[in-house]
Amino acid sequence: MIATTLLALAAAAHTPTAAAPDTGYFQQGVDYRIEARLDEATHVLHGRARLRYVNRSRSTLDRLYLHQHLNAFRPNSAWARRELELGERRFTDLGPDDYAYERFTSVRAGGRPVAVTYPGAPDSTVAMIALPRPLAPGDSVTVMMDWDARLSTLPRRQGRKDRHYDFAQWYPRIAVYDRGGWEQHALMPQGEFYGEFGRYDVTLDLAADQAIGTTGVVVEGEPGWTPGPERNAYPGRAAEPLGLLAGAAEAGRKRVRIRADSVHHFAWSVDPTYQHDVVLRSETNDLAEQRNLPTLHVLYLPADTGWGGSVVSRRTYEAVRWLGGMFGPYPWPQLTVVHRIEGGGTEFPMLIMNGGNGEGLVVHETAHQWVHGTFGSNEWKEGWLDEGFASFMTNWYWEEHGNPAVWDRSLAQLADMERAGKTEPVGWEGARFSTPQVYSAMTYTKGSIVLRMLRDMLGQDVMRRVLRQYYAEHRLKHVTGRGFQRVAERVSGRDLGWFFAQWIDRTDKLDYAVGSVSTRQSGTAWETRVEVVRTGEAWMPVTLQVGGHTRTLTSHARRQTVTMTSAERPAEVVLDPSSLLLDMDRSNNRKPVP
């Protein structure tokens, strides 16, 4: 039995900034039609896909690369071997009934059978097919694929338990071909995903009592809850039959058809016990005209009472409303949050898989609907551009919701790492970091603090304009760190190459210190002389506070002497009194006035 809670909430209208053209950008054409049947007795999904691929690049292609990410969660994969290097055996020790797999049973390209090879063997997360004929610019090829897939009993970015299935990875996913060429990479513990934006039309054959949460919009069938107005978001068209699901569904089973456009992945979860919350949203303009906004769905497990009472629904609504105001409108017809087996959370376009109901987790994963979902970054290559960005936006959300001290713990953690010499460049590719712990600290934590320093250096109003222009120019496109930098430079009117070089590309350290301090009375005022010392390679504008007076110092000098006048004798001087900078040693940032 599925319980439905309806919340009718209104939101303020937002007008996005006009987009600027990018003449050098291209995006390959991707169109998936998928039929799949989940056999719960064997836990195996049988799938068939028709992939229509259009080459919009200037290069002629002789091959295609596909990702079979499920094959990471099994013995002898690149993921499992990396964990062995770190002393972990989680997937190495999984038995034949427990590990995940994704296996082709037939592949045809251009109507002809083609062989599948695995260039990273024994890892099989990257598959290559040689095309029967070269694919010239502007040409297209149709690839037909049959495969079997099974999730692992050990949940990690996918998983199964009893009748609950988190199909975060499950189909042969075309690799990205961009200005740098093919971006095919084995799935590793450090670094995540990169996908081509495309169109998906998916029909799933499921047990009749299953409830499903998914990327996309349910356009046919019974998902186990009542769809909202998003059901009419896409123009009606008949499903292209592939032959795997011929005839009607068997007794005790059902078929659910889902469509999604302009997304770079398609994920879904099912559980027969899911409970359902829904938020129907609308906005009214100055003419009192009302229109529907994207619907929010939440599917949660009844045993977790922390999800009930619309807790997650309201937290998601508040996050979507705030983030839409910061960047621009949520771009798809709906957003679904599902309760998954694994803790933490993982983001997908139009879908969030969360293991808990915490507000920070909800906001962080919702932020990914923009920073990674809308802005299709290469998580494997520039993890800070989505994970660091999502962490930054989450902490900004907390600041504006009554927690200004949210940065303190992260600053202290990173300062310890800086002093110990354990930092690595934030801009490194994920697999290059020495350990998953360093990867996380650099990508999530330091990445967020770097963006915070950028915000406070430019000013919050300027940073808001940067975010909106970034959205206007890069909405539903692939993005890079350099692209974000260029937007920030244009909006702010400042050269920021030095900033990104020292904080993203290198590990320059920053340490400001108060040197000698003296004060003397001059008439009715006090003149205080402060020596400011900068060690380390990095430089940032820094605020000097003398008593109740502040001044921003912009000199690059290693030593500078500053004189400040105050009406009263100051008790102490402080550098960076608001703790805005990643200063590796804050113990020398203040000194009493003798």
Image: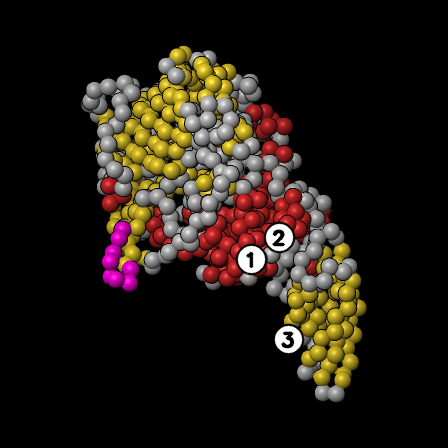
Residue 553 percent across, percent down from the top left: 69, 65
Check residue 496 in the rendering and tell me which mark sits there, or answer none: 2
Compared with 423, 528 (above or below) is: below
Q: Earlier in the sequence, mark 3 or mark 2?
A: 2
The residue segment tinted magenta is 285-292
Q: Name the residue located 48 percent from the left edge and 49 percent from the top edge.
A: 470
Residue 414 picture location, percent across and down: 64, 50
Per the image, the residue denoted by label 1 is: 492
For the C terminus, the image quarter is bottom right
Q: Nearer the viewer, mark 3 or mark 1?
A: 1
Circles 1 and 2: CB atoms closer than 8 Å? yes
Tell which tag, 3 or 2, sits nearer the viewer: 2
According to the picture, the residue beneath numbered tag 3 turns out to be 548
- In the image, 215 versus 326, the foreground residue is 326
* Tag 3: amino acid: Gly
Q: What residue is at 66 percent from the left and 51 percent from the top?
A: 498
Q: Secondary structure at mark 3?
A: loop
Q: CA distance from mark 3 to mark 2?
A: 31 Å
> Which badge, 3 or 1, is on the more N-terminal residue?
1
Residue type of the residue flagged with mark 1: Ser
Quarter of image, res 575: bottom right
Say whether residue 159 is visible.
no
